Image (cartoon, rainbow, N blue to C red):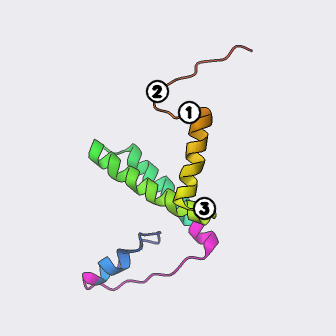
Amino acid sequence: MPQYNKLVRDNIPEIIKATGKSFRTRILDPEEKKDMLQAKLQEELQEYLTASTDEAALEELADLLEVIDALAVVHGRTWQQLRQIQDAKRQHRGGFYQGIFLIDVDD
């Protein structure tokens, strides 16, 4: 039996069950959940960085968003509240759309 020992999406047990395979899972405590979500964030980021097509990159970005959404909840906020924080930062400091590369600043 393959060992995974990793955080999986909520519907994965039902998907496995539908194949007729047996499996074991457990529910993580809040601190473990946070740690595993952080590890999942790194995993998904690495998969995004190594994606070879735009379609694969977008799939990985979607996975990153899912993990970020769950982490927002771990930190006591909703996706909407996280987006409000993002919007406020964008209003104050801007986004990353223009590709501005800061070389240096004279003191």
Looking at the image, which residue is at 60% across and 65% down? 74
Farthest residue, direction right:
107
Element type at marker 1?
loop
Q: Is residue 99 above or below residue 62?
A: above
Mark identifier at residue 98: 2
Q: Which residue is mark 1?
A: 94
How far across and down, in percent of the image, does residue 93 sit?
61, 33
Task: Judge whether 107 appears above or below 99 on screen.
Answer: above
SS at badge 3 = loop
Given residues 65 and 21, the one toward you in this image is 65
Q: Does residue 27 appear in this view?
A: yes
Q: Give the amino acid type for the residue marked by disc 1 in the picture.
A: Gly
Residue 51, image quadrant: top left
Q: Which mark is residue 77?
A: 3
Q: Which residues are magenta?
A: 18-34
Q: How many marks?
A: 3
Q: Residue at x 26, y 82 (%)?
A: 18
The picture places residue 33, in percent across and down from the top left corner, at 57, 69
Q: Residue at x 40, y 43 (%)?
A: 49
- Residue 107 in the image: above or below residue 50: above
Q: Main secondary structure of the magenta part?
A: loop
Q: Assess whether mark 1 and mark 2 are in contact (beta carbons under 8 angstroms).
A: yes
